[in-house]
Amino acid sequence: MRALWALDHAFQSASKRMERRFGVTAPQRIVVRIVGRFPGISAGEVAEILHLHPSTLTGVLKRLQARGVVLRTTDPADGRRALLSLTARGRKIDALRSGTVEATVQRVLSGRGAGDGAVDARARRPSRGGARPSGRVAAGDLGW
């Protein structure tokens, strides 16, 4: 449980930092990455990739559109479908590689640290009974 807490804490902290620095939260960044990889993808397809109900994604897409990150166009073949693409601002956000939520998660899982969710040598060494001496996570704790 400590490992999951540390990962979740790192994810939430990174999301707040990303919103302050780049204007998007971690969930929004994930949507930007998917749309950047698959320009012209439908909202339903994004929801399917994320294993979300499409209505759950609606608010995220509306905020990204309002912030000028995602462009919604009507599918010419089916007027009921919205096709998504990134604006110039969205492409800049998609191109970010440092300071992102995925960079933070990667650091936590690889054991290189991520601020509050940092992994140190003490956290990697099991204490009596196999419990961790701190609330920090080692990548091996998650089986990855």
Image (tube, grey):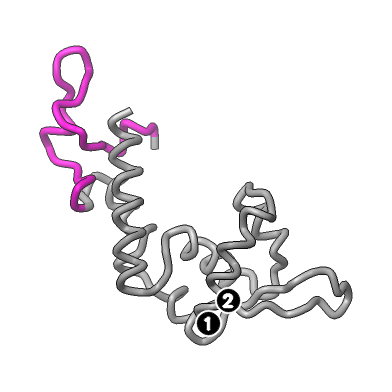
Residue 103 position by quadrant: bottom left
Q: Which residue is identified by label 2?
A: 65
Q: Residue furthest bottom?
A: 88
Q: CA distance from mark 2 to mark 1?
A: 5 Å
> Disc 2 on helix, strand or loop?
helix
Q: Residue at x 32, y 60 (%)?
A: 16
Residue closest to the eye, 25 or 90 = 25
Image coordinates for residue 63, horizontal then vertical, percent: 54, 70
Q: Are marks 2 and 1 in contact (CB under 8 Å)?
A: yes
Q: Residue at x 85, y 80 (%)?
A: 76
Image-based side of 32 in relation to 49, left or right: left
Q: Is residue 109 magenta?
A: no
Amino acid type assigned to the residue bearing label 2 in the image: Gln
Q: Which residue is identified by label 1?
A: 68
Q: Residue at x 55, y 78 (%)?
A: 66
> Disc 1 on helix, strand or loop?
loop
Residue 24 position by quadrant: bottom left
Image coordinates for residue 3, horizontal then vertical, percent: 30, 34
Image-based side of 57 in relation to 32, left or right: right
Residue closest to the eye, 38 or 86 = 86
Q: Residues within 10 Å of mark 1 (few under 14, many from 20)?
A: some
- The relative height of residue 104 versus residue 127 in the rendered view (above or below) is below
Amino acid type assigned to the residue bearing label 1 in the image: Gly
Q: Is residue 136 magenta?
A: yes
Image coordinates for residue 31, horizontal then vertical, percent: 55, 63
